[in-house]
Image (cartoon, grey):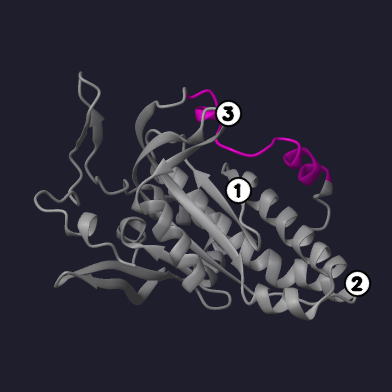
Amino acid sequence: MFSGEMAEVKKSLSEGLGHPNFTDMEYGEIIPGSIIVFFMDIRGFTKISIALDNEELIRILQATTIASIYSVRKFGGYIIEYTGDGIMAYFGDGIKTNSRDAFNSLRTVAYLMEGIKNNVNSYLSRNGDETIRIGMGLEYGNTLWTQIGTPDACQPKPISEVTFIAGKNSSHAKSWEAIIGENIAEWVPEGFKDTYEAYEFQKDNEKYSYKRFLFKWQEFSKQFNSDMKQMEHTFLNKSLPTLGTTIMSNAGSIINTSNTAKNGPRPLKDQPFF
């Protein structure tokens, strides 16, 4: 727990889940936009769940989740889901994402990493509970918002590779690592990122590769604490990369102008992965 901040934590807990700009979407509606997606996962939590009793699991999850909620909302993000052993969050208004949104997502990563590593684990240790290790994932890009589910049981979601890459980055991250996708990494200045193994697979003799990078959150935090104004200038002086747009035609069909769009045969349709 972050000492001295419980009142703000309690306030943020009352704000609910989801992105407020899309709670009133009509079922079947599709809205083009862009977003930054953030995931945090506890490493090895399945093993922890087997080794510990349920009461201790609750204490661990509550301490970690409350710290995560506060950290995300402190920097303007929105908690979307509790993923069992972590959280999913968005940054940006969902329609147009800017460099301030990206900067705030990086601040959240560094702040939450330090908070869990130092404060939450100290809190758990003082109470005789198991301490934890976490990993994080982050990516930015274009998306289509829609209500997923049935009319009486649906949730507004941004659908694109961005959401799934951010989740995969988080699940692949080692303890205290934050893996970022190629879109947001293009915007992050040199000195705050390092190369990381790409996410790759092959299907029907075609190789797919998605570049990923390691966000150097310790260096980010160190320099931010040393000179906040200079760091803001370094990051906010550059716009996020333009990735194309997804628009709706007058007939209601989707026209994708993203630079990653592919035309032609769709081998995955008739030859599924599994």
**Where 74 falls versus 230 (above or below)?**
above
Mark 2 residue type: Asn
Q: Element type at marker 3?
A: loop
On whether residue 9 falls in the magenta region, the answer is yes
Real-space CA distance between mark 3 and mark 2, rounded to the nearest whole angstrom: 42 Å
Q: Which mark is residue 81?
A: 1
Q: Residue at x 46, y 44 (%)?
A: 101
Q: Element type at marker 1?
A: strand
Q: Earlier in the sequence, mark 3 or mark 1?
A: 1
Q: Earlier in the sequence, mark 1 or mark 2?
A: 1
Q: Nearer the viewer, residue 153 or 51?
A: 153
Residue projecting furthest to the left? 264
Q: Residue at x 39, y 55 (%)?
A: 234
Q: Position of residue 116 (x, y in %)?
A: 70, 67
Q: Are marks 1 and 2 in contact (CB under 8 Å)?
A: no
Q: Position of residue 156 (x, y in %)?
A: 50, 35
Check disc 1: other Cα within 10 Å, few if <14, some if 14-19, many if 20+: some
The nearer-to-camera label among 3 and 2 is 3
Location of residue 53 (image quadrant):
bottom right
Q: Quadrant of the C terminus?
A: bottom left
Asked whether residue 92 is in view, the answer is yes
Q: Which residues are magenta?
A: 7-25
Check disc 3: other Cα within 10 Å, few if <14, some if 14-19, many if 20+: few
**Where 26 falls versus 182 (above or below)?**
above
Q: Which mark is residue 127?
A: 2
The nearer-to-camera label among 3 and 1 is 3
Residue projecting furthest to the top? 250
